């Protein structure tokens, strides 16, 4: 039996849930910047990994070869090759570029949101948040 269980058995009466109301009146700029950067970095890595997995699945099922045949017949060009344009290296390069651009944009937007919130708090007084220990 743990210490917490012993203390719980000793206390025969049930305590009332205590409620606390706090106002969020300031967001630290550097904390918001770091948090938005790490979230954006995680989303960028997820973008690259999902793109790689999707390309592998599409390539292994033969979608690119089938598309080459269909589009070659449609355009009446037997040398048409979509597989050449969507090679693994090109697709992964574009996925990395998009992940990098999204990381930068998301980080900047997180910093702007923190600054805007800190400016708006002066007008609105902040967000009222309630907590309880139930």
Image: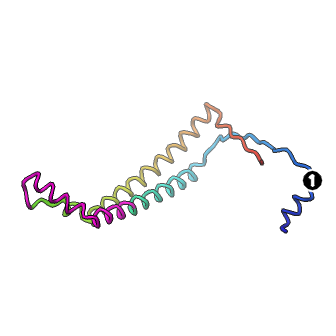
Considering only vertical position in the picture, is 31 above or below 93? Answer: above
Query: Which secondary structure lies at badge 1?
Result: loop
Q: Is residue 120 left or right of residue 102?
A: right
Q: Quadrant of residue 88?
A: bottom left
Residue that extends furthest to the top in the rendered view of this protein:
123
Identified at 61% across, 36% down, the residue is 121
Q: Is residue 119 left or right of residue 94?
A: right
Which residues are the magenta region? 50-78
Relative image position of residue 3 (x, y in whole percent):
85, 66
Identified at 51% across, 58% down, the residue is 38
Identified at 27% across, 65% down, the residue is 59
Q: Looking at the image, which is closer to me, 86 or 33?
A: 86
User: By what rule are the colours in the image chosen?
Assistant: rainbow
At label 1, counting other C-alpha atoms closer than 10 Å, the crowd grade (few under 14, some 14-19, many 20 or more) is few
Relative image position of residue 112 (x, y in whole percent):
49, 44
Which quadrant holds the N terminus?
A: bottom right
Q: Is residue 20 magenta?
A: no
Considering only vertical position in the picture, is 103 above or below 53? Answer: above
Classified by dominant secondary structure, the portion drawn in magenta counts as helix
Considering only vertical position in the picture, is 29 above or below 99? Answer: above
Relative image position of residue 119 (x, y in whole percent):
57, 37
Q: Is residue 66 magenta?
A: yes
Relative image position of residue 117 (x, y in whole percent):
57, 39
Instruction: Please name the residue that numbered disc 1 is placed on.
Output: 12
Identified at 76% across, 45% down, the residue is 132
Q: Is residue 79 left or right of residue 48?
A: left
Q: How many marks?
A: 1
């Amino acid at each position: 039996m743990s210490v917490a269980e012993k203390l719980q058995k000793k206390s025969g009466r049930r305590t009332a849930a205590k409620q606390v109301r706090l106002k969020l009146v300031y967001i630290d700029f550097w904390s918001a910047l770091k948090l938005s950067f790490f979230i954006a970095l995680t989303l960028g890595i997820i973008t690259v990994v999902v793109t790689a997995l999707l390309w592998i699945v599409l390539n292994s099922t033969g979608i690119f070869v089938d598309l080459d045949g269909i589009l070659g017949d449609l355009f009446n060009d037997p040398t048409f090759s979509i597989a050449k344009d969507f090679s693994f290296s090109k697709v992964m390069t574009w996925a990395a570029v998009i992940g990098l651009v999204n990381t930068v944009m998301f980080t900047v937007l997180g910093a702007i949101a923190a600054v805007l919130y800190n400016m708006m708090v002066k007008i609105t007084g902040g967000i009222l948040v309630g907590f309880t220990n139930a």
